[in-house]
Image (cartoon, coloured by chain):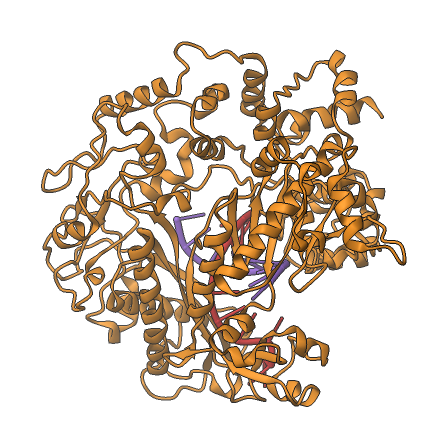
Chain colours: A orange, B red, C purple
Amino acid sequence: MSDGKKKRLLEREEFAGQKNERKRKQHLEGKEEDYRRIEEAMPVARRETCDGRVIAHVDMDCFYVQVEQRTQPNLRGLPTAVIQYNSYKGGALIAVSYEARKCGVKRSMRGDEAKEACPQIQLVQVPVARGKANLNSYRNAGSEVVSVLSQKGRCERASIDEVYLDLTDAAETMLMETPPESMQDIEDEVLKSHILGLEIKDGSDAKEEVRKWLCRSDATYQDKLLACGALIVADLRMQVLKETEFTCSAGVAHNKMLAKLASAMNKPAQQTVVPQSSVEELLASLPIKKMKHLGGKLGSSLQSDLGLNTVGELLQFSEEKLQQWYGINTGTWLWNIARGINGEEVEGRLLPKSHGSGKTFPGPQALKTIDSVQHWLNELCEELNERINSDLDQNKRIAHTLTLHARAYKTGDSDSNRKFPSKSCPLRYGARKIQEDALILFQAGLRDFLGVYNSKAHGSENNNWGVTSLSVSASKIVPIPSGTHSIVKYFGGQLPSSSTSNQSLDVVIDEAAPSSPSGSENRSGLIPCELRLEYPEDKGIKHPKACLDQQDSLCNVSSEVDGLTEESSPMPPPGNEGRMPHNEPRTDLPAKDPRLVSNTSSLKAVGKKKAAGKKLQGNSSIINIFNNYHNSQSSMGQKNVTNAQGVEVSSSLGSQAATASVSYSTCNQVEVLDENPHEEFDATNSGSIIANAPHGRQAWGYNINEIDPSIIDELPPDIQEEFRTWLRPQKRPNVVKRGSSITHYFLPDKSR
DNA sequence: ACGGTTATGACA
DNA sequence: TTGTCATAA
């Protein structure tokens, strides 16, 4: 092994798997003389993958079908598919049972085709509400599953029917306390596991072979951990079945990428384990397009531009070459996945980051009048409103941005393929307001879409344009500042009077609303005034606005939350660790591979401190840091201390409170018409939440990069997690320019 | 433009 | 920050 490679591996080690390192106290100092010792001491797998984690990916089997079969048990065991929209060719299939798949029914089929392929197929329609598909039943069912799976280890809701679990701690504990080899008997569900690379000879008993593999006393430490992971996941899957009646499949591996691959390998209702020793062979034969994130244009480029067929074939290219071709981040990511390396963290997020409601109007259904657009926008906004209100009720979260997306065509002239631009504005709670704002956003988009000229199209038919899809979404959803957030809880008794209030949300909604003139004339809005001039028919429609002006009050929305907050980290981490791009797949090891990172200095500092300063310094205690923070905030004379009525605003240390002083402003409270109290609530992204969130690292009273990481060890595990999220490094900006089209994925080599 | 709808994330 | 694009299920 070359020195360069050694160094690379070592440096990765230094930053990888902090939790495990903490546990095993394997502090890699990065000293030359330690190379040999470390290489000998480290299990091979851990050296190569920098990754001793136990990650599971759980994938529900044809989930929508299962949900329908649960409510209609007579459908169980029958070839079944879920369709939406019956009118055109029998509707579109969106989920197909495994019985139906055996008959040759595929997801891309229409209802009619499915009937053709499988006459006995049972077609169930997606529920319809307000003239559009409504997926709530599936969302709720997905939440049921999550609440079972999140019992053990960190859990990330990856989609409506997929979950990642970090089972490292649970597996390590099991290995120490009740390792598989010590067990009398092992659950049948575990013995049905598929172990990649485990050869099952003809005539031999597969379950017995699996049992032997799981209980091997001479297995590597890595394999033993995976064996524990398999036991845990099988148990969780059985629990899911028992509590929800749904079956699922799972993959167990050392990272997310491999776990995801594995969960799809044996479906339905089975699980697959990926020992490190099987990875090379697995990737060597894995078609490029099967890898997550390579199913699109990037994968096509790898095939057509580099002539690759399998992921393993990426091994022939140097990291530098891949970077030249695909950019720094994508290049490194590709180099890593070819080796089965993927440092993405399991995020610990059980709730979605946005809500959306949309509908397409294909072909002849295209909307040709503003009135019809308004009608559908109203429907969509009503659903959206319902969803964000539920989120507020159930999760105490507030959405701050409203976005409108549309697609439209233009007949006839010139640039008829211009895209309809998406538009967004601050989100004001209340169905009416959302509807109003959405319409304004649409009109702004339409104006851009059509160009400055012909803007008029009232109720009557127009033959210039047609809208083929509409959607509204609510994003930037943050938990309301809460006295029960884990960190606040933890420090609640130790900090000098954090002025956390126990005021309930209802009180806020009822009382915090200042009465203000209902007119919007004087308010600075995000939608420019010109909009109103160009659309006189909008008269009377208020502008979406940022409620920052003097008549708006700041209000304290701290409240009791009752165990909801632990589900989500209220403040997104400053770094992008744990995210995967598409256009630019993230390098999973930017921080673990300092060669690539320009802003590594702080990271290195952190790493060095961690390695060198293991002793707690007297003043490095986390408590002191918070006290300092608190003091500095106080002495800085917090901007948002009081609201218009002189009511003190929370300066509690909820995560977003720490990074951004807590304040929500409200406006237009008086004129609202709905009976729902939520209708009165305005979550405009004012105050400093939005302003400060992206600068979280600076928003504290001290430089977050200067925290000695060892102090974190003082905290309870869940709090530690939260801190590590904040301390996670940021991704390296890509310096290579690239367009979005496929041809741009393959850049000419500028170095020659 | 009948693979729809919903969701996530990077980048300009 | 907003808007666009890419990707996935």
* Foreground of the two, A225 or A572: A225
* Foreground of the two, A605 or A84: A84
* Horizontal side of residue A244 vs A479, given as left or right: right
* A113 versus A614 height, above or below: below
Residue A274 place in picture, x, y as percent: 73, 47
Residue A140, quarter of the rendered image: bottom left
Residue at left offset 43%, top offset 73%: A134
Quarter of the image that includes the N terminus of chain A:
top right
| Residue A324 visible from this viewpoint | no
* Horizontal side of residue A164 vs A700, given as left or right: right
Residue A282 place in picture, x, y as percent: 80, 50
Q: Residue furthest front?
A: A184
* Horizontal side of residue A519 vs A463, given as left or right: left
* Horizontal side of residue A334 vs A304, given as left or right: left
* Foreground of the two, A678 or A237: A237
Residue A659 place in picture, x, y as percent: 35, 34
**Count of marks overlaid on the render:** 0
| Residue A717 visible from this viewpoint | yes
* Foreground of the two, A730 or A107: A107
Q: Residue furthest top?
A: A618
* A572 versus A460 height, above or below: above
Quarter of the image that includes the C terminus of chain A:
top right
Residue at left offset 66%, top offset 43%: A255
* A168 versus A88 height, above or below: above
Residue A656, quarter of the rendered image: top left
Residue A543 place in picture, x, y as percent: 25, 62
Residue at left offset 53%, top offset 85%: A363
